[in-house]
Image (cartoon, rainbow, N blue to C red):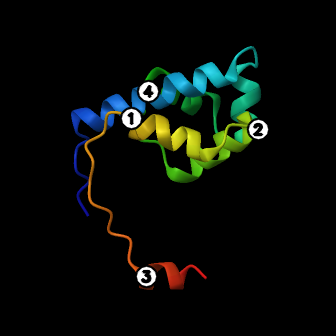
Amino acid sequence: MVRQPLTAEQIAAGQRLGAALRAARADRSLVEVALAAGISPETLRKIESGRLPAPAFGTVVCLSQALGVPLGDLADVWLADMPVRQASWRPAAAQALG
């Protein structure tokens, strides 16, 4: 499967996310937060600097937990200034989730 290149909007969203994570980290060391999230310090450095603009969902979840930032808040940062897309959520999908 060929991976599609990121759009300019997705790159900008990743940069916003990285800046938000850096701000949430505040005075905590990069190493401390990375280890708490179960990722390498280099990965966190790349995310915060925008060099890794589309981290894996699980990585964002773990960072959210390690930093005490609600996942929804990080999603809001990612979605700010993104083009609105019609939701593809269907009742069958909701039932499958329980």
Report the side of 78 relative to 81 (left or right). Answer: right
Dividing the picture into quadrants, the one containing residue 79 is top left
On residue 80, the disc is 1
Locate residue 65: give its quadrant: top right
Q: Secondary structure at mark 2?
A: helix
Q: Which one is in front, 69 or 84?
A: 84
**Foreground disc of the pair 2, 4:** 4
Give the distance between the C-alpha atoms of the residues marked 3 and 2, in whole angstroms.
36 Å
Which amino acid, by three-letter code, is at mark 3?
Answer: Pro
Residue of label 2: 36
Q: Quadrant of the C terminus?
A: bottom right
User: Looking at the picture, which amino acid does disc 2 mark?
Assistant: Ala
What number is the disc on residue 16?
4
Residue 30 placement (x, y as % from top left): 68, 22
Which residue is label 3 attached to? Answer: 91
Please, which residue is most extreme toward the top here?
27
> Which sits earlier in the primary sequence, circle 3 or circle 2?
2
